[in-house]
């Protein structure tokens, strides 16, 4: 075998390490990828005093899956609990093959896990994973100084309804069709497992003073908050919500005030749409 | 001599726990200073540190333990906010912070990831890191990251390739880069030199530093069947900026660098010999799996002082004779 180039060695070893399935099949896939002949392990790797070339290669392959497993167990503990260890492990192996890490950090490995579970299992399990992923992302989202009631106090009353608000990075809204939040709560509280079942749920996840929170919202509150986060003016969001849900203006302002206090918004726009300023 | 493990008594200061080894003829710091071989950058010995791990965040923030520095995994803090960054900023305001990365991938054949490097540079500025460190390895192929420290064939061709990348990285970061010898589980037939020869030449050709992980020398020596003491004697000490020591797991047929246990005595002996050769370098104990309480890890860190003192005493004895 002529001396291979570094990129060929890397194509070969990388393919072998990340390829799912049996070791022999992984070695064949690696040889095909790098354009090497059969018997590449013996051609390229020295035996150790105790291990064959194939056994030495397999150490890296085993560690790859373990590492992926550990990373996703940290990010999706409730999904693992719900699915069971064996099924979760098997799903992780398929997942990292379909959606391999393309980041310098394992923090992003689970980005497509909810999508994968929808493709492989069900919408219900997918929603549980989506909830967990949201908590992960909210926990590490970029910091931003949040808007306070004091910031709003300086706004002239006649311009108040024209204000548009920019949500903080650490805030995500979800409209679930299943009881993902209830199942998550069961895991979190150490309660007996219940089944995922159809039961709509609006949820906001956010970070306040370094802690991650989640809150179920009524349909009207969710509609109001979604409008604000999508850049509608306070007046537009209020009007739409009052018309559709017959909520009182006082109730909506009470919610709005609590959201400001919880640090949901980082900037506001007093002029034309499109440009947000920092807190005043 | 009292066995180090039995000397770990209660007490707050390193000196109180380990004292100084009083072996005559110890001629004091002046004599020792003359034996010190400075590193190429004149960077000081930052003392004894430990990894900043999330299970210890509350202890570190509330107790402010006496630790010379904390090492953080760079990727844990790149481009994010929330608690990790808040903890890092608080720690950096009280302690020296050293950055250790796992994704620089100096041996890769993909183009350098300047987006990653820009984030790393920003973080290094933020915590005032005197240098950054990573591994002699590659981690990704065609942007697919295995998150493993995969081995490089030790050839003239790859040496040229890696040296060029390291030069570019250092130019971009405007900081010295210390490359760590990784634990390896396989050797390529095509390799043309030993790892320590490769690292020594790389350090010269790229003008970079070395992070000499003594446990990794021990692990690779067992797995490949070379003499770890011979390796230690060949380390170009003027290039060493920093040391790691750690525990490992013996699997019978091979050793895995698990960072999940106490440092074994043989590794401490090799560490002592290195300190005897260079006279003092920053040292950090890695404990990343089955992480025990803070005090247990801290006590392991403090053992290093005993071996450093032992090395100093031996160096002075040698100089006196």
Image (spheres, coloured by chain):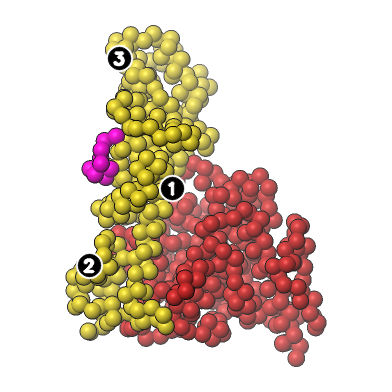
Chain colours: A yellow, B red
A91 or B240, which lies in front?
A91
Please say if A254 is above or below B213: above
Chain under callout 3: A
Local secondary structure at mark 2? helix
**Horizontal arrangement in the rendering, residue B134 relative to residue B240 (left or right):** left
Q: Which residue is mark 1?
A: A74
Q: Quadrant of residue B233?
A: bottom right
Q: Which residues are magenta?
A: A116-124
Percent position of residue B230, x then y: 54, 86
Query: Would you say A8 lies left or right of A224 here?
Result: left
Quadrant in the rendering for residue B160: bottom left
The mark that comes first in sequence, 3 or 1, is: 1
Query: Which residue sits furthest front?
Result: A192
Q: Which residue is mark 3?
A: A240
User: Which of the chains bears the disc numbered 2?
Assistant: A
User: Is residue B197 shown above or below A21?
Assistant: below
Question: Which class describes the residues within 10 Å of circle 3: few (<14), some (14-19), or many (20+)?
Answer: some
């Amino acid at each position: 075998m002529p001396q291979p180039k570094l990129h060929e060695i890397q194509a070969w070893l990388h393919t072998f390490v990340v390829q799912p399935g049996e070791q022999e099949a992984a070695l064949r896939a690696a040889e095909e990828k790098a354009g090497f002949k059969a018997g590449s392990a013996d051609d390229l790797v020295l035996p150790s005093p105790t291990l064959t070339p194939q056994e030495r290669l397999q150490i890296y392959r085993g560690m790859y899956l373990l590492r992926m497993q550990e990373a996703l167990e940290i990010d999706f503990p409730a999904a693992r609990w719900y699915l069971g260890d064996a099924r979760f492990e098997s799903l992780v192996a398929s997942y990292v093959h379909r959606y391999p890490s393309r980041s310098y950090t394992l923090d992003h490995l689970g980005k497509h896990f909810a999508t994968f579970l929808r493709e492989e299992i069900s919408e219900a399990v997918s929603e549980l994973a989506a909830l967990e992923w949201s908590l992960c992302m909210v926990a590490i989202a970029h910091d931003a100084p949040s808007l306070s009631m004091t910031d709003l106090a300086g706004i002239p009353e006649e311009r108040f309804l024209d204000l548009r608000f920019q949500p903080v990075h650490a805030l995500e809204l979800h409209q679930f069709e299943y009881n993902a939040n209830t199942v998550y709560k069961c895991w979190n509280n150490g309660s007996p497992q219940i089944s995922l079942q159809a039961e709509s749920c609006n949820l906001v996840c956010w970070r306040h003073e370094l802690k991650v929170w989640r809150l179920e919202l009524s349909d009207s509150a969710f509609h109001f908050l979604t409008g604000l986060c999508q850049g509608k003016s306070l007046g537009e969001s209020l009007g739409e919500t009052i018309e559709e849900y017959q909520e009182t203006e006082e109730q909506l302002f009470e919610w709005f005030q609590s959201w400001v206090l919880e640090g949901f918004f980082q900037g506001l726009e007093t002029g034309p749409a499109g440009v947000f300023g920092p807190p005043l | 001599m009292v066995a180090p493990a039995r000397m770990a008594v209660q007490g707050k200061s390193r000196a109180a726990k380990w004292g100084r080894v009083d072996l005559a003829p110890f001629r004091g710091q002046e004599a020792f200073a003359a034996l010190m071989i400075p590193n190429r950058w004149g960077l000081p010995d930052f003392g004894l540190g430990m990894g900043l791990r999330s299970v210890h965040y509350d202890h570190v923030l509330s107790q402010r333990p006496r630790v010379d520095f904390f090492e953080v995994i760079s990727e844990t803090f790149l481009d994010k906010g929330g608690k990790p960054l808040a903890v890092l900023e608080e720690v950096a305001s009280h302690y020296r912070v050293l950055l250790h990365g796992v994704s620089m991938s100096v041996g890769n054949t993909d183009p350098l990831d300047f987006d990653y490097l820009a984030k790393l540079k920003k973080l290094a500025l933020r915590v005032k890191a005197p240098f950054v460190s990573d591994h002699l390895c590659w981690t990704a192929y065609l942007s697919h990251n295995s998150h493993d420290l995969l081995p490089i064939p030790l050839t003239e061709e790859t040496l040229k390739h890696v040296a060029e990348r390291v030069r570019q990285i250092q130019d971009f970061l405007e900081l010295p880069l210390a490359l760590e010898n990784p634990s390896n589980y396989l050797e390529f037939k095509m390799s043309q030199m030993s790892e320590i020869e490769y690292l020594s030449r790389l350090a010269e050709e790229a003008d970079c530093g070395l992070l000499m992980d003594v446990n990794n020398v021990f692990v690779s020596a067992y797995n490949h069947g070379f003499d770890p003491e011979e390796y230690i004697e060949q380390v170009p000490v003027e290039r060493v900026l920093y040391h790691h020591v750690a525990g490992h797991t013996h699997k019978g047929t091979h050793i895995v660098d698990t960072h999940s246990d106490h440092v074994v005595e043989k590794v401490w002996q090799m560490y002592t010999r290195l300190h005897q050769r260079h006279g003092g370098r920053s040292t950090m104990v890695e404990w990343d799996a089955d992480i025990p309480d803070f005090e247990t890890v801290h006590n392991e860190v403090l053992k290093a002082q005993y071996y450093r003192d032992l090395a100093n005493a031996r160096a002075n004895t040698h100089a006196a004779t």
